[in-house]
Image: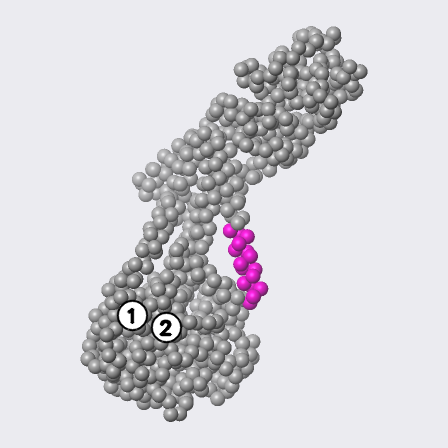
Amino acid sequence: MSHITRSSQLPEQPEKETEPHPDARTATGTPADAEPETGPAPGPAAPDADAIAGTDDTEADGSVRTDDAEADGPAVADDLDTDGTAGAGAVDSDKTVSTVEAPAGTDAAAGAAASDAPAKADADTDGVSEAAHADGDAGDDRSEKADADAAGGDGVPERADGDADRGGRSEKGDGAGGDGDDGVSEKAAGGRGVLRGRLAKYPQVARVVTVGTTVLAAALVLFGLLVPNKLERLELGAFVRIPAEGVLLAALLLALPPKPRRITSYVVGALLGLVTILKFVDMGFYSVMARPFDLVLDWILFENAADWVKESFGRSGEIVAVIAVVVLVIALLVLMTLAVARLTDVMVRHRPVATRTTLILGTAWITCVTLGVQFTDVPVASQMNATIVQNRVDQVQASLHDGQIFAKQASVDAFADTPPDQLLTGLRGKDVLFTFIESYGRTAIDDPAMSKEIDSVLSEGTSGLKSAGFSSRSAWLRSPVTGAGSWLAHSTFLSGLWIKNQQRYRSLTTSDRNTLTKYFQKTGAWDTVGIVPGVRRAWPEGKFFGLDRIYDSEHLGYNGPYFSWTPVPDQFSLGAFERLEHGKKNRKPMMAEIILASSHNPWAPIAHMIDWNDLGDGSVYNQIKKEGKDPKEVWKNPESVRREYRNAIEYSLHSLTQYVEKYGDKNTVLVFLGDHQPVPTVTAGSTSRDVPVTIVAKDPKVLDRISDWGWTDGLKPSKNAPEWRMDTFRDRFMTAYGPHPGTAAATPTP
């Protein structure tokens, strides 16, 4: 149909008298082959190629004569300004052909209407048209029909000649609208026009591309709104839900004016992208540490994760993983932002349908909440994203205040003023070995899938130690971490403070707090030694813990291979301790902190026990590693992971108990424990953070001092054995082996 714009909508132009062509007639009486009237070219500029693309020749007086096909309508319609009026007066020099309006019902009018539809569709695809700016929301409604016509493909004729490449718009026409098309540059508009013009030649392809892009955008946005932040919740029911956030945001975007709406759509898309990324990070943290990511305190753990990937899968694996993560993060942010912007444009072009759909979904959400409707045991009404954001706000506030709380707790030390000669008097002359077994958690003992084998190892160890003259007592300690964070558990056990995050660890290691190992050093009665094969770089914290000599992975004399993350097999670490420290003659009593790392994730390949005399420099382990399993194969299913975890714990327990049987004596006191539970893949849903703890000694007086603790005889704690927080052990231990044995008060809950 013909589009006629009121004169008040046109930009003011200086009136310019033009003498009509002698052959000019009214629209009603113009024959099909009549030549349209032309005005003088405003300046010396040559005519644009697009403007003359459909002409046969140029008259001597400068007017342009069109061919018969163009006189029917479509080419004339393309020369209309964007508001539908003839391009007369001060217009672009390209438009040298004046327009003769045809009355409704004529062939020319029909051709103009057909040509106008794709031009409007192009403008509406940008989400902004000159008419929309002039008329407000009414323009959005008017553009819906044009969009529908364009999408249908039936109303998109191929443009004649050069008009197809122009996309139905001239660059000058874009700029002459008066409102700047929401700031879209002429260059960008021209680029889009070329693409749309080419797509207009293939309407079915254009329709498929348009619909397909919209469907993909909707799928991505729904995925971001509905994807959970735990892997175990990633199931069909999680995506058959109504997200409250999506309904509210749709209503907001529909209510806003055009320019604020577009800005808001970009902001909402970026925020949804960030929340989606946070959910993926949470998946990783829940899978390893059974807790969500801490936005304030956990950034350092990404470096540790990269180190773990490097040691487990090599340098190339680390590089690939880092690049993949960075690319995915950027892509998700960009695509989510564009997806929300596209869906916003679609909703605006189909405002009545979008409004009704939003109202229906909102009503359905309220109904589902009221009735408690569920699908596969998952509530249909979702407000997960709002909950996650609120929890993170609370978490950030708590993390920011945690430093003050910890400083207050760290200022209290029951033994700070105790004279050195009254510290640990019940252990004078003894070699005290505090040994941590990596990932040795309660699951290894209680889980039916592995308890039989572990129970056999513990029973064998108890019998072997008893034959060597040793007795033992066992119980449970609750670790501040699970799945990872061994250094936090170590520092909790030794400091008597609840070190649950990296901020507390940094605060502790830069303070003057006395740890259990430092109190041994403070007495002057012991040499203090650290066997820390998991340390592969400078470790200044070692001095804070009161260790006189530290042997990391580079100083144990090991020339064998890494076993995935594990730098040194446990048996070799204990053999090195015997060679470097414990086996020396005429030495002082010693206190040693020993870390056994063979049971560290990923538990493949695993070393096995060999003769102690064959350890050498560790080169014997090259063949043992070749015979081991590939971690990538092990981690293909949870059952194989659990099986290899059990094998790793068995190896660590064998190494330790056989060492004590072989090298222990009447002055040996061994305290060994797990640092934390393994990853959730192994714990299989268990939420316990308990780890076993055992004290082994040959001198009966040592165990008599803890007779009132109620611990279980042997290396295996019973199910009803005492369960203490790990941070309470230091004070209990120092009280039991001090000048006045007794039960120390538990540390207050942080």
The residue where tag 1 is placed is 496
Q: Which of 306/220 is in front?
A: 306
Residue at 56% x, 76% y is: 626
Residue at 48% x, 71% y is: 537
Q: Which of 176/211 is in front?
A: 176
Residue at 53% x, 31% y is: 182
Residue type (three-letter) at the residue carrying disc 1: Gly
Against 309, is 418 above or below? below
**Rendering colour mode:** one colour
Region in magenta: 314-329
Quadrant into which the N terminus falls: top right
Which numbered tag is attached to residue 24? none
Q: Position of residue 565 (x, y in %)?
A: 49, 70
Q: CA distance from mark 1 to mark 2?
A: 14 Å
Q: Which of 532/438 is in front?
A: 532
* Residue 398 figure quarter: bottom left
For marks 1 and 2, the one nearer the N-term is 1
Disc 1 element: loop
Q: Position of residue 650 (x, y in %)?
A: 42, 76
Which numbered tag is attached to residue 544? 2
